[in-house]
Amino acid sequence: MKYKNNIYRVVCAIVLSLLSPLSYAYDFEIDGNYYTLISTSERTVAFAGTTLSGKLVIPEKIVISNKEFTVTSIEGGWMKKTGENVKSIVVPKTVTILERSCFYGGQFEEISLPSTLTEIGEMAFQNCSQLKEIEIPNNVTSIGHFAFHGCSSLTHIVLPKSERCSIGAAAFCSGPQPKGKLIIPAGIYFANDYHSNGDHYVAFDDCSELDSLIFEDSNAHLYAYNGILFTSRKTRSSEFGQCNNLKYVYIGRPAIHYWGSDDYGNHTPVFAKVVEYGDKCEIQYSYRNVYTDFATGALEKITFGKKLSNISSYTNSGNLVEVYMRNETPPSASVFSNYTYIHGTLYVPKGTLKVYQEADVWKEFWNIEEYDVPEYPTGIRPVSVQEEKVLLGIYDINGIKHDIPVKGLNIYRYKDGHVKKNVK
């Protein structure tokens, strides 16, 4: 009988161990959180799960057997096992890299990332369907493939203003739907090199809720796969799809040869009422002999930057009535529509009226006026990464300034007017 009882106990222990989702996945449990050992000599551990609910603040350090260990990473897959009840997460500054799939499938609504973060791994936030907004710290230099893929509630996205940051294929695809204005900082480029059965994946595949899209000034080309930046519908051959409701587009990069296409390679111009090209952007002919970048009938106002040497055709832009030139030398250009020549106004830099009145194409405008060219096309001075990092002060929830972060909510105010929030 005793023998049978012992067998029963052993079987029960085995069954319970199989039912416990983290029975094999952690080394320590402290204050309701699970951790695995990374290095004894360096005293580092990885966060591996939690029994807590609501707000989860992952600690920077833990104490094990009177020894202090630093939390330097977050293991992937833990949210599917123990994180179902977590609603918000604070990642510690000791974590500089978010590993592959570290928050995969989580149902939390908000997350605070530390300024020390430098890399977001592949699928890090994939299928986090309740996440509503994300502010990526400025030190991040890499956002992996499918990082925010399937985040169906994600509408507010702030990209990092690092010196150079790559965005992987499908990083904000199949779910994220940015609303209002989306700013692509100067250091952003798209590393669309992920292949699956020959397919190329779009970075943002549903921009139908955007009304403004701004590509900040940069000397580097805004690289897109095969030169295709915009599409009129969801596809796997560009970076921005479904840009159907844009009212304003600012392009501060050297030209992309081929801005728009559909799934069959047919040119699909971008619908926008106001378009401005920055002074670092040069307009060039498309290598596929397609010259119209923006949709006919939608465009009402356009500004061309100072580096402009050649303009593609706007022949059928029937509603275009304001054309602003920042270049004192008239660039070569194809013809505009008769409607634009008759009803529109060409604004040229002060002192250049005569030269534009005598230049081919430009002399066809019935109305030409001089104007004072502002220093910057948008009237807003671009902010450098270095200036953005100048901290003016740290304030608590009551607006009191502190020299160092205090316990609770900290509000960081920067020289460029940018504000960040963090919880200590």
Image (tube, helix red, strand yellow):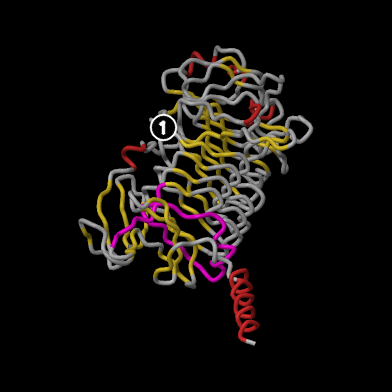
Q: Amino acid at mark 1?
A: Tyr
Magenta includes 167? no
Residue 241 appearing in the image: yes
Give the structural element (helix, strand or loop) at label 1: loop
Nearest to the observer: residue 423 or residue 183? 423
- Residue 5 at what x, y percent from top left? 62, 84
Nearest to the observer: residue 241 or residue 364? 241
- Residue 2 at what x, y percent from top left? 61, 85
Q: Which residues are magenta?
A: 67-96
Position of 331 with respect to 70 (left or right) is right
Residue matched to label 1: 376
Magenta includes 69? yes
The residue lying furthest to the right in this view is 264
> Which residue occupies 59% across, 75% down?
13
- Residue 180 at what x, y percent from top left? 55, 51
363 in relation to 180, above or below: above
Position of 229 with respect to 103 (left or right) is right
Nearest to the observer: residue 16 or residue 169? 16
Residue 369 appearing in the image: no
Position of 411 with respect to 163 (left or right) is left
